[in-house]
Amino acid sequence: MGDPAGIKRQYRQFAGTECKGYSDLYYRLAISVSEDDEMAGFIADMPETQPNLFLASIQLLTGPAGMPATGSELRAFVKRRGSDVRAAMRARRTQTNEVGRCAVLLPALPPGPLALVEVGASAGLCLLFERYHYEFGSTRLGPVDSLVRLQCTTSGPVPLPPAVPRIVWRRGLDVRPIDVHDDDAVRWLLACVWPEHHERRRRLEGAIDTARADPPVIRAGDLVDDLPAVLAEAPDDIQLVVFHSAALSYVSRERRQAFAGLLADASKRRDIVWLANEAAGVVLELTAPAPSGSLRFLVSRTHFANGQRRSELLALAHPHGAELAWL
Ligand SMILES: C[S@@+](CC[C@H](N)C(=O)[O-])C[C@H]1O[C@@H](n2cnc3c(N)ncnc32)[C@H](O)[C@@H]1O
């Protein structure tokens, strides 16, 4: 049994930094867990206790419209369907594949042609930059007939490219790759979208349909142990970009160091650009203080050449890509 007091703190923090002003429903439910010994005890018993995993497991069973709306409904649901919630939490991991993040990564990409590797790719939907339509204020990029429209509010000198760079090769790497043709896996991806976020759900469905027409290759494996084999597949003569979003946070500090060390080592053979879109403190090369207030990801870029690295913090990004503040 884990520590119910720690669960209460974890859910209170999730409510305050990730849900407040963004999802009234998840705010209410997370606060209710933070005040409920029984619910905190239930979650503490699970191997992974993340709020997103718990709430997505419930949504998997209810659908977005049937999600419990209050703390007492949540408690009643868990009483009734506790064994199903446990089974979902044991079988699944948080795998939110948020295509909105393409909008905050796009301005950080070097000019094409590019070879892309995404670690922690989930279904690989963030590898499909050129298949989406972007709206940065009055600047529009990408195919107008795309099934996916990404709206991103910007501030600061965002270096918007004249066009989405040409991508000539791409690979994902994920410890549990999601196959967009697997209906059960797709149901899980949809359950990871918060219930009131109808626009996010619509664009995820659009991205899944887009990917189904020509899915990216996602290798199954660990972002440290299996990265060298994926890098070895990349074409030699094309600028290689290795990137990730909300993924490096799932591994320990030592593994993050090992990941950056692998890129430095690989750069003795070829230059590599590393893009990260992660919560503050995840990319160890960045020393900037964590932004205060609601959760913001840090978009950073590191150039690796001849084993040397040069890192720059570029921007603060909304975790689901709705806003981008260039520094
Ligand atoms: C929250 S999802 C983010 C998915 C995607 N990057 C995005 O931003 O939409 C995190 C992903 O990282 C993967 N992951 C976690 N630990 C990993 C590891 N050690 N190696 C590879 N992938 C990992 C998970 O399976 C999951 O698909």
Image (cartoon, rainbow, N blue to C red):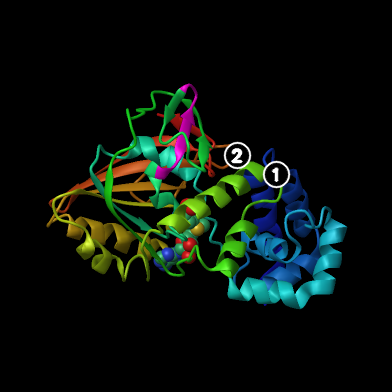
**Is the CB atom of the residue marked by disc 1 within 8 angstroms of ligand 1's nearest atom?**
no
Question: Camera-side residue: 130 or 155?
Answer: 130
Q: Earlier in the sequence, mark 1 or mark 2?
A: 1
Q: Residue at x 38, y 58 (%)?
A: 216
Residue 130 in the image, given as x and y percentages of width and height: 37, 42
Amino acid carrying mark 1 in the image = Ser
Going by the numbered disc 2, the residue's amino acid type is Ser
Q: Secondary structure at mark 1?
A: loop
Q: Is residue 49 left or right of residue 62?
A: left
Residue stretch in magenta: 131-138
Image disc number at residue 23: 1
Residue 314, percent across and down? 37, 35
Q: Residues within 10 Å of mark 2 (few under 14, many from 20)?
A: some
- Tell me: residue 289, above or below residue 182: above
Query: Is 296 above or below relative to 327?
Result: below
Q: Is residue 309 left or right of residue 254?
A: left
Image position, residue 71 (x, y; %) = 83, 56
Q: Which image quarter holds the N terminus?
A: bottom right
Q: Which residue is mark 2?
A: 294
Left or right: 251, with 112 as reference point: right
The percent coordinates of residue 109 (x first, y second) are: 31, 40
User: Real-space Cα distance between discs 1 and 2?
Assistant: 12 Å
